[in-house]
Amino acid sequence: MKRQQTWQANAWLKASAAVFVAAALTGVGFAMWLENGAGIFIAMAQSGLAWCF
């Protein structure tokens, strides 16, 4: 019985670590978008307009 509980605890630990890493990466990506989002949007708009001409 104790082995099954240890296995479940390890599964929960791995799942929570994966969720934490995903949340951290999402937060970093969002912070970078806030800092550089306008420049990225302008660059993409300019390259899109270049294809029109």
Image (cartoon, rainbow, N blue to C red):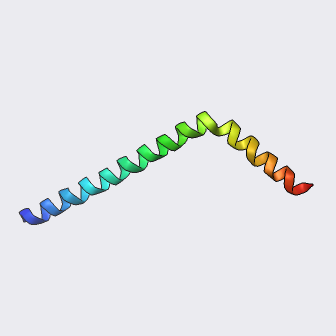
Q: Does residue 6 appear to the left or right of 49 in the view shown?
A: left
Q: Position of residue 2 (x, y in %)?
A: 6, 62
Measuring 65% from the left and 39% from the top, which residue is drawn there? Answer: 37
Q: Position of residue 10 (x, y in %)?
A: 20, 58
Q: Does residue 4 appear to the left or right of 13 in the view shown?
A: left
Q: Does residue 2 appear to the left or right of 48 in the view shown?
A: left
Q: Position of residue 27 (x, y in %)?
A: 47, 41
Measuring 41% from the left and 43% from the top, which residue is drawn there? Answer: 24
Measuring 30% from the left and 51% from the top, which residue is drawn there? Answer: 16
Residue situated in front as seen by the camera: 17 or 5? 17
Task: Name, please, the residue furthest toward the top.
Answer: 35
Quadrant location, the N terminus: bottom left
Measuring 68% from the left and 43% from the top, which residue is drawn there? Answer: 40
Quadrant location, the C terminus: bottom right
Task: State which quadrant residue 42 falls in.
Answer: top right
| Image vertical order of residue 17 relative to residue 5, above or below | above
| Image vertical order of residue 29 relative to residue 52, above or below | above
How many numbered discs sit on the rendered protein? 0
Q: Does residue 45 appear to the left or right of 3 in the view shown?
A: right
